Image (spheres, rainbow, N blue to C red):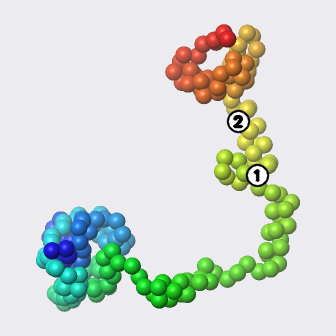
Amino acid sequence: MAFYTYQHSTDDGRVFYIGKGKKRRAWATKYRSKWWEKTAAKHGLNVSILAHWRTEHEAFEHERTLIRTFRELGHPLVNLTDGGEGFAGGKHSQEWRERISAMFKGRPGKPMPQEQRERLRAYLKANPPITFLGKKHKAESIAKRSAVRRANAPKFAADGISMSASEWAASLGLHISTIHYRIKTGKLVRVEA
């Protein structure tokens, strides 16, 4: 039988959630409400399979009946609905998708006023962002960071000349990562080419 109804209870035996599922749903902790997560974290989680069903419809009916019954008995369930919603592994109809799409169109908020758009456009034209390692940064911030890194870079003395690790790597014909590896492992030795 593919579907089942289940309950989640606390460590002291109090039922706090009734659900319908298949496969491993009863034991899943993802895709739960914040209320469910807080209750399970605070009071523990015990899973019990209550009944198995051939069809999803039968499982939904049983879930609704159980939720109604437990609530009538005074159990403070964390179920957000009265049960019987959704369907397992199904695809929504085109009509349903269009309706949901129409609901969310234009929702992020009011559009930016034209005056503000023009100010932003002028600012970005005057201060173009520079892409560096996949991120956009202003030229000043990149220069500032580079200067700080150079000032704080460890200096090494080679042949009586003080130089940074990158300069030393270049003078030896090595990659900077080799110098850093040798620094970390204590194997920093000048290698003659």
Report which residue position mark 2 lands on: 149
User: Looking at this view, is 63 or 119 the one in front?
Assistant: 63
Disc assigned to residue 179 = none
Q: Earlier in the sequence, mark 2 or mark 1?
A: 1
Q: In the rendered image, which residue does mark 1 sit on?
A: 130
Secondary element type, mark 1: strand
Please tell me whether mark 2 sits on a helix, a strand or a loop.
helix
For disc 2, the neighbor class at 10 Å (few under 14, some 14 to 19, many from 20) is few
Q: Is residue 35 above or below residue 80?
A: above
x and y percentages locating residue 181 in the rendered image: 56, 25
Residue at (23, 72) in percent of width and height: 22
Quadrant of the rendered image containing residue 56: bottom left
Q: Is residue 151 visible?
A: yes
| Residue type pointed to by label 1 | Ile
Q: Residues within 10 Å of mark 1 (few under 14, many from 20)?
A: some
Amino acid at dot 2: Arg
Q: Nearer the viewer, residue 57 or 81?
A: 57
Residue at (28% x, 65% y) in the render: 28
Q: Where does residue 10 sit, x and y in percent of width and height?
A: 20, 68
Closer to the observer: label 2 or label 1?
A: 1
Can residue 14 be seen in this snapshot?
A: no
Look at the image and tell me in which quarter the N terminus lies: bottom left
Q: Quadrant of the C terminus?
A: top right
Are the residues flagged by discs 2 and 1 in contact, CB closer than 8 Å? no
Task: Estimate the x, y position of residue 112 in percent, counting from the top left.
Answer: 73, 78
